[in-house]
């Protein structure tokens, strides 16, 4: 016997929308979606292309109890997880994507987890 998620999906979406209006939780970031990587003979190095999308994401810093909830992504204490609404999804996601925060620090993505097609949990490497 499991939860009939369809029966509560509207209410869960409403709570999620309410969370994204809480200025204490959201952070403006740029989601940098990996497009391609090519070798530039003139520069003698790889050149990476990204598509940048400005988003407001919920930023959570993991403590011991919250880290235990993310067993699939092996989130460690002190690491940051961003929550993105599925409706804000910039397209295909990859572990080569980056998140650039307000101070222009590029953060590598460590894990991507779809949450009932309502949101994405994006775990990042510690900075």
Image (cartoon, grey):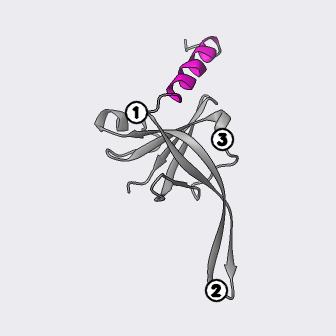
Residue 122's label in the rendered image is none
Q: Position of residue 86 (x, y in %)?
A: 64, 34
Residue drawn at point x = 58 percent, y = 59 percent: 96
Counting residues from the N terminus, which is met first, the one under dot 1 or under dot 2? 2
- Describe residue 81's horizontal placement relative to residue 39 as left or right: left
Q: Which residue is mark 3?
A: 89
- Give the alpha-carbon distance from disc 2 to disc 3, as whole Å: 33 Å
Residue bearing the label numbered 1: 69
Q: Residue at x 52, y 28 (%)?
A: 21
Tell me, for residue 43, which label it has, or none: 2
Foreground mark, 1 or 2, reads: 2
Label 2 secondary element = loop
Residue 58: horizontal and vertical position, in percent?
A: 48, 37
CB atoms of marks 2 and 3 within 8 Å: no
| Residue displayed at 59% across by 33% down | 119
Evaluate whether residue 74 shows in this view. no
User: Is 20 covered by the magenta stretch?
Assistant: yes
Give SS at disc 3: loop
Kindly report the distance in space between the C-alpha atoms of the residues bearing marks 1 and 2: 44 Å
Q: Nearer the viewer, residue 98 or 53?
A: 53
x%, y% of residue 83? 52, 37
Counting other residues with Cα less than 10 Å from the Cα at mark 1, is it few (<14), some (14-19), or many (20 or more)?
few
The spot of residue 125 in percent (x, y) is 43, 54
Taken as a whole, is the magenta stretch helix, strand or loop?
A: helix
The magenta-colored residue range is 7-21
Q: Which element carries disc 1, helix, strand or loop?
A: helix
Q: Nearer the viewer, mark 1 or mark 3?
A: 3
User: Residues under labels 1 and 3: Cα distance?
Assistant: 23 Å
């Amino acid at each position: 016997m499991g939860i009939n998620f369809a029966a509560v999906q509207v209410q869960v979406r409403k709570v999620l929308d309410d969370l994204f209006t809480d200025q204490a939780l959201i952070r403006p970031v740029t989601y940098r979606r990996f497009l391609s990587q090519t070798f530039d003979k003139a520069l003698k190095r790889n050149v990476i292309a990204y598509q940048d999308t400005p988003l407001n994401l919920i930023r959570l810093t993991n403590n011991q109890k919250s880290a235990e909830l993310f067993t699939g992504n092996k989130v460690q204490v002190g690491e940051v997880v961003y929550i993105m609404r599925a409706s804000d999804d910039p397209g295909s996601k990859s572990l080569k994507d980056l998140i650039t925060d307000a101070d222009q620090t590029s953060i590598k993505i460590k894990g991507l987890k779809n949450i009932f097609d309502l949101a994405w949990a994006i775990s990042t490497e510690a900075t």
